[in-house]
Image (spheres, rainbow, N blue to C red):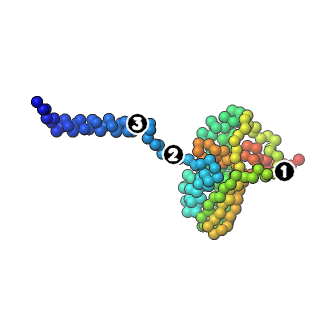
Amino acid sequence: MIRVLQPTRILLAFFLFFTIWLAHVVASPGLPSPKQGYSHDAKGLEKQYEPFLKALAKRDAASMNDAYKVFFIPEQDKWFASYFRKEDVEQLGWDQEAENENEKKSLITITNLVGRGTRFHAHCKPASGDRQTKLAPRSDAFVPLQPVPVEQFEVEFVADNGKRFSILGNFVYVDEAFRFVGKGAYPFWSMPDATAPKH
């Protein structure tokens, strides 16, 4: 004898099967997950600058601030603690924030002077190894307990109208992005203090 299922039972069975299948799909570890990040090379750094420079061209202050956050070291206390003495970590965190805020303001100021209203693009290349400076690191510099993987890039900002300026930037690559740690010959924790009295 063949039993005929009631329509409600068929619907209930289908719903139950669909729910189990959906739960399996959502929980499946094999599904690709969205990935954000920049490649660990000069092209990656160029792409990282683009959202900030795009917002800069539009003079969109809120978007500029959001876009520049990628240059700050995430979980900075934890990161600095892995390279420096624990008693130096808090000050390093403050200095890193100040350094980035100053760099952001500097980029805004210079682009206004060089080519206000034009769109800039970053062109990056690793700094040449033959750069020399007569400046020595400051005597009271924070000394890391182990080498910090600082990378130097020559970053040239070129406007659509052809005007340009460049910086020598120091970066550390953390969590798939370059984090700015000062410009010039040294990272900010070793940079000589230009305001210090000369002896």
Mark 3 or 1, closer to the camera = 3
Instruction: Give the residue drawn at x 68%, y 59%.
Output: 156
Where is residue 86 shown, x and y percent of the image?
69, 32
Instruction: Give the residue drawn at x 40%, y 36%.
Output: 27
Which residue is disc 1 drawn over?
134
Where is residue 15 shown, x and y percent of the image?
26, 38
In the image, what residue type sits under mark 2? Lys
Q: Report if residue 41 is visible in the image.
A: yes
In the image, what residue type sits under mark 3? Ala
Q: Which of marks 3 and 1 is nearer the N terminus?
A: 3
> Could you tell me how far apart the alpha carbons at marks 1 and 2 are, in whole angstroms?
43 Å
Q: Which mark is residue 27?
A: 3
Q: Is mark 2 on a helix, strand or loop?
A: loop
Where is residue 178 shown, x and y percent of the image?
63, 47
In the image, what residue type sits under mark 1? Lys
Question: Pointer 3: residues within 10 angstroms few (<14), some, or many (20+)?
Answer: few
Residue 73 horizontal side relative to residue 18, left or right: right
Residue 67 horizontal side relative to residue 163, left or right: left
Q: What element carries label 3?
A: helix
Question: Pointer 2: residues within 10 angstroms few (<14), some, or many (20+)?
Answer: few
Picture quadrant of residue 117: bottom right
> Could you tell me how far apart the alpha carbons at marks 3 and 1 are, in whole angstroms?
59 Å
Instruction: Give the residue drawn at x 19%, y 35%.
Output: 9
Camera-nearest residue between 89 and 16: 16
Which residue is disc 2 drawn over?
35
The number of discs equals 3
Mark 1 or 2, closer to the camera = 2
Quadrant location, the N terminus: top left
